[in-house]
């Protein structure tokens, strides 16, 4: 999980959240790896799955853990000393990005219930409000797996990123008003 935004905002380093052990690390230009935060120790065994940077904080979307894949999004200070929940109701957050409007957006890939875990067309894109609640932007996404803000200000969603036949994947453009 690398983010170019984090590299620009994070003093020339790349940042990644290793999902199997919950280690949030930085990599400098010489290739040296440093632990920023041990997410498993700080918030429990939830799988980090997406990452973005904004205004001095890293925002990490979590796949969650079985049953239900629910954890949501946390933010981590650049020093790694502060980890704060942003949202604790989204499930399987495989993409987080800040829109051109400055708001945080997230894609959820599952219904948050278990079992069954993977149900087609229950994914959605939501805006995360300042109090952690969410506002639905679009629903009926089919296994969305990535989210990015384009240079045109639109959000782009990788749809049908898993669980689909070869050639069925899509990139969806979501224009914000």
Image: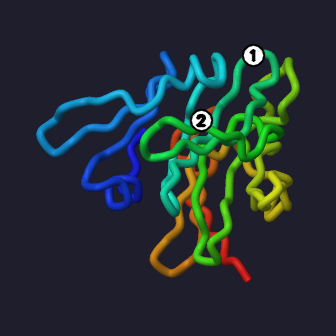
Pointer 1: what residue? 66
Query: In the rendered view, does 141 fall on the left or right side of 28?
Result: right
Pointer 2: what residue? 162
* Residue 47 on image: x %, y %: 60, 25
Q: Quadrant of residue 50?
A: top right
Q: Quadrant of residue 98?
A: bottom right
Residue at image position (32%, 37%) is 26
Marker count (numbered): 2
Is disc 1 surrounded by few (<14), some (14 to 19) or many (20+) residues within 10 Å?
A: few
Q: Single out the mark in the foreground, 1 or 2.
A: 1
Residue 54 got which mark?
none
Query: In the rendered view, does 2 fall on the left or right side of 108?
Result: left
Q: Counting residues from the N terminus, which is met first, the one under dot 1 or under dot 2?
A: 1
Please identify the quadrant where the N terminus is shown. Answer: top left
Residue at image position (35%, 54%) is 10
* Residue 106 on image: x %, y %: 68, 53
Task: Look at the numbered disc 1 and give the secondary structure of its residue.
Answer: loop
- Of 116 and 72, nearer the camera is 72
Measured in 3D between alpha carbons, the distance from the residue under mark 1 to the one under mark 2, in whole angstroms, is 18 Å
Residue at image position (70%, 26%) is 64
Query: In the rendered view, does 163 fall on the left or right side of 69?
Result: left
Q: Residue furthest left?
A: 30
Is disc 2 surrounded by few (<14), some (14 to 19) or many (20+) residues within 10 Å?
A: some
């Amino acid at each position: 999980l690398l983010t170019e935004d984090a590299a620009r905002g994070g003093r020339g380093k790349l940042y990644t959240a290793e999902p199997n052990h919950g280690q949030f690390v930085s990599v400098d230009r010489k290739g040296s790896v440093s632990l920023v935060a041990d997410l498993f120790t700080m918030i429990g065994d939830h799988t980090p799955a997406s990452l973005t940077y904004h205004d001095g904080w890293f925002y990490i979307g979590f796949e969650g853990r079985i049953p239900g894949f629910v954890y949501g999004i946390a933010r981590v200070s650049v020093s790694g000393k502060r980890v704060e929940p942003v949202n604790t109701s989204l499930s399987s957050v495989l993409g987080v990005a800040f829109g051109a409007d400055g708001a945080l957006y997230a894609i959820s890939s599952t219904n948050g219930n278990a079992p069954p875990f993977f149900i087609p067309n229950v994914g959605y894109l939501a805006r995360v409000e300042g109090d952690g609640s969410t506002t639905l932007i679009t629903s009926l996404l089919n296994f969305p797996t990535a989210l990015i803000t384009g240079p045109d200000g639109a959000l782009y969603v990788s749809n049908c990123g898993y669980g689909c036949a070869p050639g069925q994947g899509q990139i969806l453009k979501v224009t914000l008003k």
